């Protein structure tokens, strides 16, 4: 009986692995710069009342601006990202963060956030990210 040799990683798996590495190192801006397509978009589960954060943000520049603003207005006490699980051109991973916002409706309040993110990869770049959180179940 022969031994099983797994196939080489797919393009999606390589992007997923790199995203997890960068996020674990707190390099969210680098992840967007390196891994996102110019026309990539984020789709949040909902708009945040009283916040400038939109449900859908489109374009790499807009995503970088949003991430830079997050970095300026949020103190991250700790964060983690789970392993990425790939299927075809998509992968998911769980992200958790303990943070305090300095602006907006949650200013001054420490929050423990948890979300699942689903990424779609096209031509070796992330074209879309959807975030799932806050159902209160």
Image (cartoon, rainbow, N blue to C red):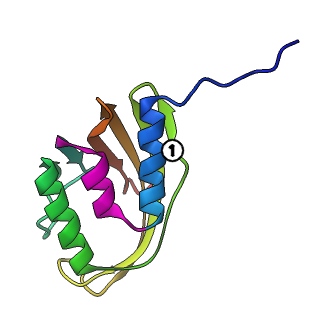
Against 43, residue 95 (above or below) is: below
List x then y, in percent, for residue 35: 31, 46
Against 129, residue 53 (above or below) is: below
Which quadrant of the view contains residue 63? bottom left
List x then y, in percent, for residue 106: 25, 78
Given the current orientation, which residue lies at the most extreme bottom position? 108
In the image, taking residue 110 as reference, residue 9 lies left or right, namely: right
Looking at the rendered image, the quarter that the N terminus falls into is top right
Magenta-drawn stretch contains 27: yes
Residue sitting at 55 percent across and 49 percent down? 83
List x then y, in percent, for residue 105: 19, 77
List x then y, in percent, for residue 102: 23, 84
Magenta-drawn stretch contains 23: no
40 or 54: nearer the viewer: 40
Q: Residues within 10 Å of mark 1 (few under 14, many from 20)?
A: many
Q: Which secondary structure type mostly characterizes the magenta part of the structure? A: helix
In the image, taking residue 91 as reference, residue 40 lies left or right, namely: left
Visible residue check, residue 107:
yes
Q: Which residues are magenta?
A: 26-38
Q: Could you say whether the residue bearing mark 1 is in a helix, strand or loop?
A: loop
126 or 99: nearer the viewer: 126
Residue sitting at 18 percent across and 72 percent down? 69
Visible residue check, residue 106:
no
Can you identify the residue that label 1 sits on? 84
């Amino acid at each position: 009986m022969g031994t099983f040799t797994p196939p080489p990683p797919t393009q999606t798996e390589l992007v997923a692995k790199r995203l997890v590495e960068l996020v674990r190192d707190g390099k969210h801006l680098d992840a967007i710069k390196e891994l996102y397509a110019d026309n990539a978009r984020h789709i949040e589960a909902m708009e945040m009342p009283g916040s400038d954060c939109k449900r859908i943000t489109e374009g790499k520049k807009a995503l970088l601006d949003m991430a830079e603003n997050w970095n300026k207005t949020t103190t991250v006490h700790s964060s983690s990202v789970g392993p990425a699980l790939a299927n075809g051109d998509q992968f998911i991973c769980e992200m958790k963060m303990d943070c305090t916002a300095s602006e907006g409706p949650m200013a001054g309040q420490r929050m423990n956030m948890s979300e699942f993110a689903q990424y779609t990869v096209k031509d070796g770049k992330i074209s879309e990210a959807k975030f799932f959180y806050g159902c209160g179940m």
